[in-house]
Image: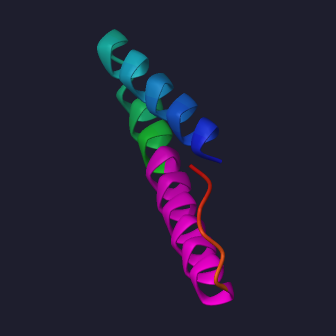
Amino acid sequence: MLYWAIVFFIIAVIAGILGFTGIAATAASIAKILFVIFLALFVIFIIGNYRRGKKPPL
C-alpha cells in the first residue's frame, strides 16, 4: 500500500510539473488517502504485536 501511495505521489509531482493540475490534484488526493490508510494499519499492527508480547524484527 505504501508502494501505491509513493507511485501516486510521483504521478502527482510529474503531472504538476507538466501543468496537468486536475490530474495532479486527483493523484495527490489518492496518495494522501493511501498513506493515511497505511499509517493506520501500521499503528494497528504495532499495537497488536505489542499486546501479544512480540518484539518487532530488527
Tell me, yes or no, whether the highlighted magenta stretch contains residue 38. yes
Q: Answer above or below: position of 35 versus 48.
A: above
Q: Which residue: 47% across, 31% down?
A: 23
Colour theme: rainbow
Q: Answer above or below: position of 37 versus 51.
A: above
Q: Position of residue 50 (x, y in %)?
A: 57, 81
Q: How many marks?
A: 0
Q: Which residue: 56% across, 72% down?
A: 46
Q: Position of residue 56 (x, y in %)?
A: 59, 62
Q: Give the image quarter of residue 12.
A: top left
Q: Is residue 36 left or right of residue 57?
A: left
Q: Main secondary structure of the magenta part?
A: helix
Q: Is residue 13 left or right of residue 47?
A: left
What are the residue bounds of the magenta stretch? 30-52
Q: Which residue: 45% across, 33% down?
A: 9
Q: Which residue: 46% across, 24% down?
A: 10
